[in-house]
Image (cartoon, rainbow, N blue to C red):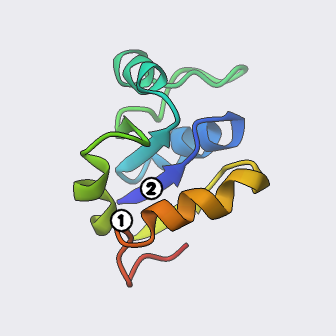
Amino acid sequence: MLTILGGGAIGLFLASLFSKDDDVILITHSIIQSNKINSDGIYVSGLKKIYTKNVLSISFNSPKLNKILPYSKLLFICLKSYDTKNVLLKLKKTISENTII
């Protein structure tokens, strides 16, 4: 399972591409965005709406995050640079030692 932290342009694009071959967890800032992605999928302009069947989106504040994140093999951080440190400090205890960041 791959995890992508950040539901902006880069995070959404990576989620759509990687979901072709792997299960992807997309962590977004808001529950509204997560619900929208879970119901409608991800649309990449210029491409057909494909490669989104294996994407599960959850918000950063969801209690599910602590249960799912330890099983992630690979974590992509797709945040603005000024948010990275604070977010990783919050997730530090949840991320597995075996997770590649």
Give residue 76's position: percent from left, percent from top.
Answer: 57, 60
Q: Residue 3, relative to residue 8: is it above or below?
A: below
Give residue 36's position: percent from left, percent from top.
Answer: 43, 17
Instruction: Give the residue pinned by disc 1.
Output: 72
Asked whether disc 1 touches disc 2, contact meaning CB atoms under 8 Å apart, the reply is yes
Disc 1, SS:
loop
Q: How many marks?
A: 2
Badge 2 density bin: few <14, some 14–19, many ≥20, Cα 10 Å: many
Q: Where, quadrant-wise, is the C terminus in this rendering? A: bottom right
Amino acid residing under circle 1: Ser
- The residue depicted at 39 percent of the width and 70 percent of the height is 95
- The residue depicted at 61 percent of the width and 59 percent of the height is 86
Amino acid residing under circle 2: Thr
Give residue 92's position: percent from left, percent from top.
Answer: 45, 71
Q: Residue 100, relative to residue 80: is it above or below?
A: below
Badge 1 density bin: few <14, some 14–19, many ≥20, Cα 10 Å: many
Q: Residue 94, relative to residue 28: is it above or below?
A: below
**Image mark for residue 92:** none
Query: Is 100 left, or right, of 56 in this rendering?
Result: right
Query: Is 41 left, or right, of 13 in this rendering?
Result: left
Give residue 16's position: percent from left, percent from top.
Answer: 53, 38
Image-quadrant location for residue 6? top right
Q: Where, quadrant-wise, is the N terminus in this rendering? A: bottom left
Question: Closest to the observer: 64 or 76?
Answer: 64
